[in-house]
Image: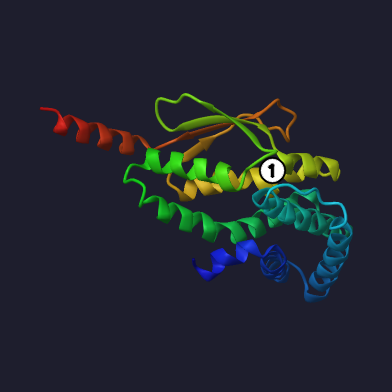
Amino acid sequence: MKPFALLLFIPGLAFTHAAKAQLAQCLPPATAAAVWSSTVARHRELQRTRPRHSMGVNLLLAYMQWDVALYRALQEHGISSQQAGEWIEGINWQIFAPASALAFKASRLRSRRLTVRLRWLLDALFRFVFTRPFRRRILPAATGVAFDVQACPLACYLREQGVPQLTHAAACSLDHRMASDWGVSLRRTQTLAGGAAHCDFRFSVPCNELIARASHNDSQTP
Protein backbone atom coordinates (compact mmCIF):
# COMPACT_ATOMS: atom_id res chain seq x y z
CA MET A 1 0.00 0.00 0.00
CA LYS A 2 1.25 3.49 -0.82
CA PRO A 3 2.64 5.52 2.14
CA PHE A 4 0.03 8.29 1.83
CA ALA A 5 -2.77 5.72 1.88
CA LEU A 6 -1.28 4.14 5.00
CA LEU A 7 -1.43 7.48 6.85
CA LEU A 8 -5.22 7.15 6.82
CA PHE A 9 -4.95 4.54 9.58
CA ILE A 10 -3.09 6.94 11.89
CA PRO A 11 -5.69 9.70 12.38
CA GLY A 12 -3.62 11.90 14.69
CA LEU A 13 -0.63 11.97 12.36
CA ALA A 14 -2.64 12.23 9.12
CA PHE A 15 -4.90 15.01 10.38
CA THR A 16 -2.05 16.97 11.94
CA HIS A 17 -0.07 16.87 8.70
CA ALA A 18 -3.00 17.89 6.47
CA ALA A 19 -4.49 20.47 8.84
CA LYS A 20 -1.21 22.26 9.53
CA ALA A 21 -0.55 22.50 5.80
CA GLN A 22 -4.04 23.98 5.23
CA LEU A 23 -3.69 26.47 8.08
CA ALA A 24 -0.22 27.55 6.94
CA GLN A 25 -1.60 28.20 3.47
CA CYS A 26 -4.59 30.26 4.62
CA LEU A 27 -3.61 32.04 7.84
CA PRO A 28 -0.73 34.14 9.15
CA PRO A 29 1.84 31.98 11.00
CA ALA A 30 0.93 33.26 14.47
CA THR A 31 -2.80 32.73 13.89
CA ALA A 32 -2.24 29.27 12.41
CA ALA A 33 -0.18 28.26 15.44
CA ALA A 34 -2.83 29.58 17.84
CA VAL A 35 -5.62 27.78 16.00
CA TRP A 36 -3.72 24.50 16.05
CA SER A 37 -2.89 24.85 19.76
CA SER A 38 -6.59 25.37 20.48
CA THR A 39 -7.49 22.42 18.24
CA VAL A 40 -5.19 20.07 20.15
CA ALA A 41 -6.60 21.22 23.50
CA ARG A 42 -10.18 20.77 22.33
CA HIS A 43 -9.39 17.38 20.85
CA ARG A 44 -7.93 16.24 24.16
CA GLU A 45 -11.25 17.02 25.83
CA LEU A 46 -13.29 15.29 23.11
CA GLN A 47 -11.25 12.09 23.40
CA ARG A 48 -12.86 11.38 26.77
CA THR A 49 -16.32 10.93 25.30
CA ARG A 50 -15.96 9.37 21.85
CA PRO A 51 -18.32 6.40 21.33
CA ARG A 52 -16.76 3.03 20.51
CA HIS A 53 -17.92 0.74 17.73
CA SER A 54 -16.16 -1.42 15.13
CA MET A 55 -12.61 -0.69 13.96
CA GLY A 56 -13.84 0.94 10.74
CA VAL A 57 -16.41 3.18 12.41
CA ASN A 58 -13.95 4.08 15.18
CA LEU A 59 -11.49 5.23 12.52
CA LEU A 60 -14.08 7.50 10.91
CA LEU A 61 -15.19 8.87 14.28
CA ALA A 62 -11.58 9.66 15.15
CA TYR A 63 -11.51 11.99 12.16
CA MET A 64 -14.87 13.50 13.06
CA GLN A 65 -13.44 14.26 16.48
CA TRP A 66 -10.51 16.13 14.96
CA ASP A 67 -12.93 17.93 12.64
CA VAL A 68 -15.04 19.15 15.55
CA ALA A 69 -11.96 20.33 17.45
CA LEU A 70 -10.61 22.28 14.47
CA TYR A 71 -14.03 23.66 13.54
CA ARG A 72 -14.50 25.13 17.00
CA ALA A 73 -10.94 26.43 17.16
CA LEU A 74 -11.34 28.20 13.82
CA GLN A 75 -14.58 29.84 14.91
CA GLU A 76 -12.92 30.88 18.16
CA HIS A 77 -10.38 32.79 16.05
CA GLY A 78 -12.96 34.56 13.93
CA ILE A 79 -13.22 32.20 10.95
CA SER A 80 -16.77 31.85 9.61
CA SER A 81 -18.53 28.49 9.82
CA GLN A 82 -18.68 28.31 6.01
CA GLN A 83 -14.95 28.93 5.58
CA ALA A 84 -14.10 26.51 8.37
CA GLY A 85 -16.24 23.85 6.73
CA GLU A 86 -14.57 24.36 3.36
CA TRP A 87 -11.11 23.99 4.89
CA ILE A 88 -12.13 20.87 6.78
CA GLU A 89 -13.57 19.34 3.62
CA GLY A 90 -10.26 19.95 1.86
CA ILE A 91 -8.27 18.50 4.75
CA ASN A 92 -10.37 15.35 4.95
CA TRP A 93 -10.24 14.74 1.21
CA GLN A 94 -6.46 15.18 1.21
CA ILE A 95 -6.35 12.37 3.79
CA PHE A 96 -8.88 10.01 2.19
CA ALA A 97 -8.13 10.59 -1.52
CA PRO A 98 -5.05 8.32 -1.75
CA ALA A 99 -6.89 5.35 -0.22
CA SER A 100 -9.91 5.98 -2.47
CA ALA A 101 -7.69 6.02 -5.57
CA LEU A 102 -5.87 2.87 -4.48
CA ALA A 103 -9.15 1.02 -3.85
CA PHE A 104 -10.45 1.98 -7.28
CA LYS A 105 -7.25 0.76 -8.91
CA ALA A 106 -7.54 -2.54 -7.02
CA SER A 107 -11.14 -2.96 -8.24
CA ARG A 108 -9.74 -3.40 -11.75
CA LEU A 109 -8.75 -6.90 -10.64
CA ARG A 110 -12.43 -7.64 -10.03
CA SER A 111 -13.75 -6.60 -13.43
CA ARG A 112 -13.27 -4.31 -16.41
CA ARG A 113 -16.90 -3.15 -16.18
CA LEU A 114 -17.32 0.06 -14.23
CA THR A 115 -20.71 -0.94 -12.80
CA VAL A 116 -19.30 -4.17 -11.40
CA ARG A 117 -16.29 -2.34 -9.94
CA LEU A 118 -18.56 0.29 -8.38
CA ARG A 119 -20.79 -2.31 -6.74
CA TRP A 120 -17.77 -4.26 -5.49
CA LEU A 121 -16.16 -1.14 -4.01
CA LEU A 122 -19.30 0.02 -2.21
CA ASP A 123 -20.03 -3.45 -0.85
CA ALA A 124 -16.46 -3.64 0.47
CA LEU A 125 -16.78 -0.25 2.15
CA PHE A 126 -19.94 -1.32 3.97
CA ARG A 127 -18.42 -4.66 4.88
CA PHE A 128 -15.20 -3.32 6.39
CA VAL A 129 -15.58 0.41 7.14
CA PHE A 130 -19.21 1.56 7.25
CA THR A 131 -20.26 -1.23 9.58
CA ARG A 132 -22.80 -1.13 12.42
CA PRO A 133 -24.34 1.11 13.55
CA PHE A 134 -24.40 2.21 9.90
CA ARG A 135 -27.46 0.68 8.27
CA ARG A 136 -27.97 0.39 4.51
CA ARG A 137 -30.92 -0.78 2.43
CA ILE A 138 -29.94 -1.85 -1.08
CA LEU A 139 -32.42 -1.01 -3.84
CA PRO A 140 -32.84 -2.45 -7.34
CA ALA A 141 -31.15 -0.45 -10.08
CA ALA A 142 -31.21 -1.10 -13.81
CA THR A 143 -27.87 0.66 -14.16
CA GLY A 144 -25.46 1.87 -11.51
CA VAL A 145 -26.00 1.30 -7.79
CA ALA A 146 -28.82 2.52 -5.53
CA PHE A 147 -29.24 2.31 -1.77
CA ASP A 148 -30.51 4.25 1.23
CA VAL A 149 -28.46 4.79 4.37
CA GLN A 150 -30.91 4.60 7.25
CA ALA A 151 -28.50 5.14 10.15
CA CYS A 152 -25.22 7.07 10.22
CA PRO A 153 -23.09 7.26 13.40
CA LEU A 154 -21.09 10.15 11.93
CA ALA A 155 -24.17 12.33 11.58
CA CYS A 156 -25.27 11.26 15.07
CA TYR A 157 -21.90 12.15 16.60
CA LEU A 158 -21.75 15.60 15.02
CA ARG A 159 -25.35 16.27 16.04
CA GLU A 160 -24.53 15.29 19.61
CA GLN A 161 -21.58 17.68 19.54
CA GLY A 162 -23.92 20.50 18.52
CA VAL A 163 -22.46 20.93 15.03
CA PRO A 164 -24.82 19.07 12.65
CA GLN A 165 -24.01 21.66 9.97
CA LEU A 166 -20.45 20.31 9.85
CA THR A 167 -21.61 16.89 8.60
CA HIS A 168 -21.83 17.94 4.95
CA ALA A 169 -18.28 19.31 4.81
CA ALA A 170 -16.65 16.67 7.00
CA ALA A 171 -18.33 13.58 5.55
CA CYS A 172 -21.13 13.91 2.96
CA SER A 173 -19.16 16.00 0.47
CA LEU A 174 -16.43 13.37 0.29
CA ASP A 175 -18.90 10.91 -1.25
CA HIS A 176 -19.24 13.18 -4.29
CA ARG A 177 -15.48 13.65 -4.57
CA MET A 178 -14.95 9.90 -4.38
CA ALA A 179 -17.59 9.22 -7.05
CA SER A 180 -16.01 11.78 -9.36
CA ASP A 181 -12.57 10.18 -8.91
CA TRP A 182 -14.07 6.80 -9.78
CA GLY A 183 -15.58 8.17 -12.99
CA VAL A 184 -19.20 7.87 -11.86
CA SER A 185 -21.83 10.36 -10.70
CA LEU A 186 -23.69 10.49 -7.39
CA ARG A 187 -27.14 12.01 -7.00
CA ARG A 188 -28.37 12.52 -3.47
CA THR A 189 -31.44 14.59 -2.71
CA GLN A 190 -31.63 14.23 1.07
CA THR A 191 -29.52 13.29 4.08
CA LEU A 192 -29.96 12.19 7.66
CA ALA A 193 -27.86 15.18 8.70
CA GLY A 194 -30.37 17.43 6.96
CA GLY A 195 -33.25 15.92 8.92
CA ALA A 196 -34.46 13.32 6.40
CA ALA A 197 -35.37 9.75 7.31
CA HIS A 198 -32.48 8.42 5.21
CA CYS A 199 -29.72 9.41 2.78
CA ASP A 200 -30.59 8.41 -0.78
CA PHE A 201 -27.48 7.33 -2.68
CA ARG A 202 -27.93 6.95 -6.44
CA PHE A 203 -24.74 6.17 -8.33
CA SER A 204 -24.76 6.07 -12.12
CA VAL A 205 -22.12 5.25 -14.71
CA PRO A 206 -21.45 7.41 -17.80
CA CYS A 207 -23.61 6.80 -20.86
CA ASN A 208 -20.59 5.91 -22.99
CA GLU A 209 -19.83 3.04 -20.60
CA LEU A 210 -23.35 1.62 -21.05
CA ILE A 211 -23.24 2.10 -24.83
CA ALA A 212 -19.86 0.38 -25.06
CA ARG A 213 -21.16 -2.55 -23.01
CA ALA A 214 -24.30 -2.87 -25.15
CA SER A 215 -22.22 -2.80 -28.33
CA HIS A 216 -19.94 -5.49 -26.94
CA ASN A 217 -22.93 -7.69 -26.04
CA ASP A 218 -24.41 -7.23 -29.50
CA SER A 219 -21.16 -8.26 -31.15
CA GLN A 220 -21.15 -11.46 -29.10
CA THR A 221 -24.69 -12.36 -30.16
CA PRO A 222 -24.74 -15.04 -32.94
Task: For mark 1, give the secondary structure.
Answer: helix
The x and y percentages for residue 189 are 61, 29
Judge left or right: residue 19 versus residue 126: right
Query: Residue at coordinates 15% horizontally, 33% vertically from top-left?
Result: 220
Query: Residue at coordinates 79% horizontally, 44% vertically from top-left?
Result: 158
Q: Nearer the viewer, residue 23 or 161?
A: 161
Q: Which residue is mark 1?
A: 168
Classify 196 as above or below 19.
above
Residue 28 is drawn in which quadrant? bottom right
Can you see residue 83?
Answer: no
Query: Residue at the left extreme?
Result: 222
The x and y percentages for residue 214 are 25, 31
Q: Nearer the viewer, residue 47 or 71?
A: 47
Residue 120 is drawn in which quadrant? top left
Q: Nearer the viewer, residue 25 or 90?
A: 90
The x and y percentages for residue 47 are 84, 58
Classify 104 as above or below 95.
above
Q: Amino acid at mark 1?
A: His
The x and y percentages for residue 169 are 69, 47
